[in-house]
Image: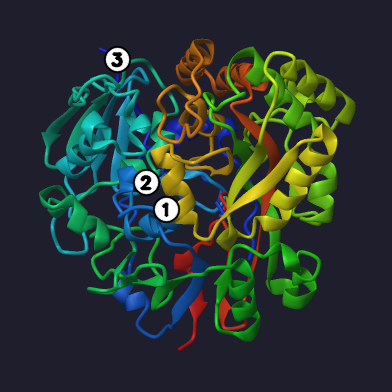
């Protein structure tokens, strides 16, 4: 019998080093160590102090965010506002450092011989903030709840690789088996070497027993196992903010260095930025476009403008009138050629965005700027008009092209510029469709009641090319907002996931992108930098590879 290969992320990082990003730490709308992980899985990963002790003499950090779309159930949260909170109050089997490298967290070890069958052993003695133990069942029951078809959770797609997953009927994840209180096994449907890398994403977080007894109530006042917890009843005031305090039971690496985090939900980014300038907000991760030309001078060395794993686009549902079949392909190509990305990123974003040349992000290893078909992203008014007229010969266009966006996220200027570019190039009526609140926009998108095109984007869940592709464009995936489906694309995703090396995997993912350039399930726009900053009230402010501030490291005097 072969000796079992110990990964504990160490071997996975060695085998998958090209999947890990290397974005430097520093002070979206929607991290710096060597990242090699514990080499022998022998360390317990605990800190000498707990959350309560470290935060005893420090102040509460205030930061901007927005109202989550749904109650805070990890497997049913796939947007940034809810994700920020979940990452603070929960901890998964692994966590990602500032550079996007994975480290063991709740996991003592993650072992495999064949990249298909994994044995996961948990650290002993860990608890949720209510004192209940974190056990193997905390993971297996949470994953099964998230994967069950009838529950309709938005992140169910992430469990597709596990044996027993079904898109057709309710089915238990038969590939999960509890061995004892701190050990469970995972059987995948095929070898997937980067499976452990995904396990820091919120879909894979554990849940206490109370979450299964009354999920709706739990989602309003969730109990986690992370460095923070909700500050009692009423901590989440909808559309206003949420108050988090350090969890005294937390024993992991991400010990809170402050007295808590208050996330304030703003109606506009301008209001948040003005609060930062006036000292009423400590940390901001989304500078409004009105301040792009001035914020670095106004904030000085407290300003942040660094690459992040964020991709921006807009989506047109695949079955929308005039946008399906051959006619739809022509119109999608025409719209893409009609957008002057270079001009918009310079005039509106002033160097804080870069025109997209693919569907992923340049900060992810394996990224390519020369994928065949990417020429459809080039501004070409004559080609755009030619394609649009060709589509009109099949079915004459009528009405107004609309692009929905949320005004609380600082999107109006670029949407106006984009629809103006489309209007002037194609000679059609085109306008923005504003929503006041991000959650309302996402609700209509999720319910498939939205009319016209709508802004979309992706802030990476884990640092891999596949994370930008599978969850958004895989058939039936939870974030596949346009209901795109292509069997050849799905097959390439499957091949990439089971590839024998990261280099081979990246090649296959980029081949899959060639299909996306033909079908254009979304219109790629640009890559985002994280633009933000901090007030003089706080220190040790850094932003991670995915643009989110590393809240637990921020210090603030009382």
Quadrant housing residue 49: bottom left
Q: Which residue is mark 2?
A: 202
Taking depth in this image into account, of 13 and 134 the one nearest to the observer is 134
Q: Position of residue 204 (x, y in %)?
A: 32, 41
Q: In whole angstroms, how far apart are the C-alphas of marks 3 and 1?
A: 40 Å
In the displayed structure, 198 sits above or below 233; it is above
Taking depth in this image into account, of 428 and 415 the one nearest to the observer is 428
Looking at the image, is mark 2 or mark 3 earlier in the sequence?
3
Looking at the image, is mark 3 or mark 1 earlier in the sequence?
3
* Residue 83, disc: 1
Q: Can I make out residue 377 in this image?
A: no
Indicate the secondary structure of the residue bearing disc 1. Answer: helix
Q: In whole angstroms, how far apart are the C-alphas of marks 2 and 3?
A: 33 Å
Cβ–Cβ below 8 Å for labels 2 and 3?
no
Q: Position of residue 53 (x, y in %)?
A: 31, 77
The crowd level at tag 3 (other Cα within 10 Å; few <14, some 14-19, many 20+) is few
* Residue 2, disc: 3
* Residue 492, disc: none
Determine the residue positioned at 64% across, 60% down.
410
Q: Position of residue 265 (x, y in %)?
A: 47, 68
Determine the residue positioned at 62% across, 21% down.
516
In the displayed structure, 201 sits above or below 389; it is below
Taking depth in this image into account, of 39 and 143 the one nearest to the observer is 143
The crowd level at tag 1 (other Cα within 10 Å; few <14, some 14-19, many 20+) is some
Quadrant housing residue 558: bottom left
Q: Position of residue 173 (x, y in %)?
A: 21, 26
Quadrant housing residue 446: top left
Cβ–Cβ below 8 Å for labels 1 and 2?
yes
């Amino acid at each position: 019998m072969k000796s079992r290969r110990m990964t504990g992320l160490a071997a996975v990082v060695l085998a998958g080093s090209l999947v890990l990003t290397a974005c430097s730490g520093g002070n979206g709308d929607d991290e710096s160590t060597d990242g090699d992980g514990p080499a022998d899985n022998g360390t317990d990963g605990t800190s000498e102090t707990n959350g309560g002790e470290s935060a005893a003499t420090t102040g509460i950090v205030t930061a901007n965010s927005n109202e989550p779309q749904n109650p805070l159930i990890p497997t049913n949260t796939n947007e940034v506002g809810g994700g920020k909170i979940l990452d603070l109050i929960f901890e998964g089997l692994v966590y990602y450092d500032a550079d996007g490298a994975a480290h063991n967290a709740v996991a003592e070890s993650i072992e495999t011989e064949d990249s298909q069958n994994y044995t996961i052993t948990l650290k002993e003695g860990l608890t949720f903030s209510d004192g209940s133990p974190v056990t193997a069942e905390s993971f297996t029951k949470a994953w099964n709840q998230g994967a069950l078809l009838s529950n309709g959770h938005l992140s169910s797609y992430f469990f597709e690789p596990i044996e027993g997953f079904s898109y057709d009927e309710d089915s238990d994840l038969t590939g999960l088996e509890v061995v004892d209180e701190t050990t469970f096994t995972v059987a995948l449907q095929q070898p997937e070497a980067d499976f452990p890398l995904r396990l820091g994403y919120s879909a894979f977080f554990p849940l206490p027993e109370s979450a299964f007894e009354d999920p709706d109530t739990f989602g309003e006042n969730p109990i986690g196992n992370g460095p923070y917890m909700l500050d009692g009843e009423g901590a989440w005031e909808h559309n206003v903010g949420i108050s988090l305090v350090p969890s005294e039971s937390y024993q992991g690496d991400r010990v809170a260095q402050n007295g808590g985090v208050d996330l304030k939900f703003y109606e506009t980014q301008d209001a948040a930025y003005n609060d930062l300038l006036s000292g009423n907000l400590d940390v901001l991760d989304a500078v409004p476009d009105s301040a792009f030309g001035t914020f670095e001078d106004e904030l000085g060395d407290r300003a942040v403008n660094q690459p992040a794993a964020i991709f921006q686009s807009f989506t047109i549902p695949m079955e929308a009138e005039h946008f399906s079949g051959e006619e739809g392909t022509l119109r999608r190509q025409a719209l893409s050629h009609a957008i002057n990305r270079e001009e918009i990123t310079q005039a509106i974003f002033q160097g804080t965005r870069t025109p997209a040349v693919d569907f992923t992000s340049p900060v992810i290893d394996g990224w390519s700027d020369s994928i065949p078909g990417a020429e459809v992203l080039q501004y070409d008014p004559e080609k755009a008009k030619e394609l649009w007229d060709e589509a009109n010969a099949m079915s004459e266009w009528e009405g107004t092209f609309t692009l929905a966006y949320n005004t609380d996220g600082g999107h109006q200027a670029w949407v106006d510029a984009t629809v103006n570019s489309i209007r002037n190039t194609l000679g059609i009526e085109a306008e923005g469709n504003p929503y006041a609140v991000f959650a309302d926009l996402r609700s209509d998108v999720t319910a498939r009641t939205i009319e016209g095109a709508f802004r979309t984007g992706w802030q990476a869940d884990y640092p891999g090319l596949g994370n930008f592709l599978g969850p958004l464009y895989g058939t039936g995936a939870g974030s596949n907002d346009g209901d795109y489906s292509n069997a050849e694309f799905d097959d390439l995703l499957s091949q990439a996931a089971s590839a024998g090396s990261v280099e081979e995997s990246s090649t296959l993912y980029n081949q899959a992108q060639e299909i996306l350039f033909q079908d254009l399930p979304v219109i790629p726009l640009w890559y985002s930098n994280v633009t933000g900053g901090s007030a003089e009230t706080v220190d040790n402010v850094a932003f991670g590879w995915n643009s989110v501030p590393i809240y637990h490291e921020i210090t603030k005097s009382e």
